[in-house]
Image: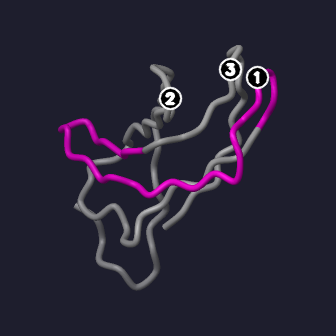
């Protein structure tokens, strides 16, 4: 599973992703891998790819997706994240 996100940097410094986690309402988490071709310049749009080698499993989605930057306190949190059912996989509980 991988997702490509387009992010806007409204800050005064470039933004580089350092990590990401998917978290459900019970607090269960899945750490995600991150990839970014280059830092997002101030006032610009850029792309970040986050993913996991397996589907989120039994996370009780909707979930929140949190990304944080490498050199600073800025984070991005997206709420109400859900995933479509995968053909051939058991129904989620």
Determine the CA span between mark 2 and mark 1: 14 Å
Count of marks overlaid on the render: 3
- Residue 93 painted magenta: no
Judging depth in this view, the residue of 89 and 53 nearest the camera is 53
- Residue 37 painted magenta: yes
Helix, strand or loop for disc 3: loop
- The percent coordinates of residue 61 (x first, y second) are 34, 47
Say how the picture is coloured: one colour
Question: Quick one: label 1, few (<14), some, or many (20+) residues within 10 Å?
Answer: some
Please tell me the numbered disc located at residue 71: 2
Q: Residue at x 30, y 71 (%)?
A: 91
Please tell me the numbered disc located at residue 91: none
Judging depth in this view, the residue of 54 and 73 nearest the camera is 73
Magenta residues span 20-45
Determine the CA span between mark 3 and mark 1: 6 Å
Question: Quick one: label 3, few (<14), some, or many (20+) residues within 10 Å?
Answer: few
- Residue holding disc 3: 13
Q: Quadrant of residue 92?
A: bottom left
Label 3 with label 1: CB-CB less than 8 Å: yes
Please tell me the numbered disc located at residue 42: 1
Judging depth in this view, the residue of 72 and 90 nearest the camera is 72
């Amino acid at each position: 599973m991988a997702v490509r996100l387009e992010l806007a940097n409204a800050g005064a410094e470039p933004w580089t992703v350092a990590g990401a986690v998917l978290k459900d309402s019970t607090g269960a988490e899945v750490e995600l891998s991150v990839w970014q071709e280059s830092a997002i310049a101030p006032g610009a749009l850029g792309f970040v790819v986050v993913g996991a080698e397996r589907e989120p499993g039994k996370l009780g989605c909707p979930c929140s997706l949190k990304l944080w930057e490498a050199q600073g306190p800025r984070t991005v949190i997206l709420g109400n994240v859900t995933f479509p059912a995968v053909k051939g996989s058991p129904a989620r509980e």
